[in-house]
Amino acid sequence: MMYSNELAMGIVSGLLAGIPSLLFGVAVYVLTALSLYTIAQRRGLNRPWLAWIPVVNSWILGSLSDQYRYVVKGENRSKRKLLLVMSILSAILSTVLCVMCVAVAVQAVFGVLQGFQANYLVRTVMDYVISLLGLLLVQLGVMIAYAVIRFMALYDVYKSLDPANSVLYLVLSILVSPTEPFFLFFNRNKDTGMPPRRPAPEATPQQPRQEPWETDNKDYL
């Protein structure tokens, strides 16, 4: 009974210790999503609500970067597409890795329970481990490429919001990642780095009223 009580107390203590981290993670996610949603909606991007959806929210960050590059420098970029593809690929690889880890554990337990020989178990587990290492290398490559492109896109967003402090924001976002959502949140209503908005033409029966920048960045909405 004593050991059962200690085990129960240990589980409860572990759960309680994880609550602050969970709440902080939720707060960071909400701040980031709210900031990207606000910026995207104000700048006339289509489907700004994608900022609230995990994985595909990278499309909004990339779209904001592409918009800035287009209207400020006249460059056609596709960071939104690259970020979305790599986000989906990373999510798939992570799922496969988790499934394979569970499969390794199940195979090992099943082999022990069935009384399989040690050599057979070692060979079976090693086959899984080699496959896992291969996938881990692929996942690492995808994560590095994603991080590089994402920070490039984030820099563009910072430049569009507050160009004077964009480098500082980027460096701190890289070194202290929890600062990123706060920088986005506190600057979400700024457009200091964007060109002056052209007056939107009045709506006509043949042509509906357009949002600012819509005629400039049609491909990036």
Image (spheres, rainbow, N blue to C red):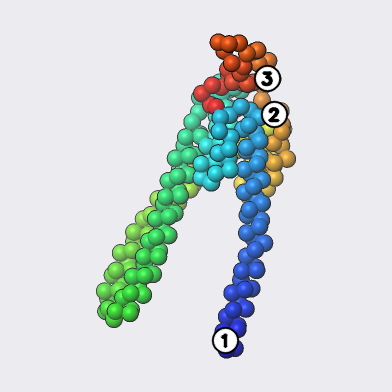
Quadrant housing residue 22: bottom right
**Which residue occupies the foreground of this view, 112 or 151?**
112
Left or right placement of residue 130 versus residue 197 in this view: left
- At x 45%, y 49%, the residue is 91
- Residue 21 screen position, x and y as percent: 64, 60
- Tell me, yes or no, whether the two marked residues, 1 and 2, touch with CB atoms within 8 Å: no
Q: CA distance from mark 1 to mark 3?
A: 69 Å
- Tell me, yes or no, whether the two marked residues, 3 and 2, touch with CB atoms within 8 Å: no
Q: CA distance from mark 1 to mark 2?
A: 61 Å
Mark 2 residue type = Asp
- Residue 76 screen position, x and y as percent: 50, 24
The answer to whether any part of residue 101 appears in the image is: yes
Q: Earlier in the sequence, mark 1 or mark 2?
A: 1
Q: Earlier in the sequence, mark 3 or mark 2?
A: 2
Q: Residues within 10 Å of mark 1 (few under 14, many from 20)?
A: few
- At x 56%, y 30%, the residue is 46
- Residue 38 screen position, x and y as percent: 66, 35
Q: Quadrant of the image for the C terminus?
A: top right
Quadrant housing residue 101: bottom left
Vertical side of 35 occupied by 77: above or below: above
- At x 68%, y 32%, the residue is 161
* Residue indicated by mark 2: 191
Quadrant housing residue 204: top right
Mark 1 residue type = Tyr
Q: Earlier in the sequence, mark 1 or mark 3?
A: 1
Between disc 1 and disc 2, the foreground one is 1
* Residue indicated by mark 1: 3
**Which residue occupies the foreground of this view, 55 or 77?**
55
Q: Secondary structure at mark 1?
A: helix
* Residue indicated by mark 3: 197
- At x 36%, y 70%, the residue is 106
Mark 3 residue type = Arg
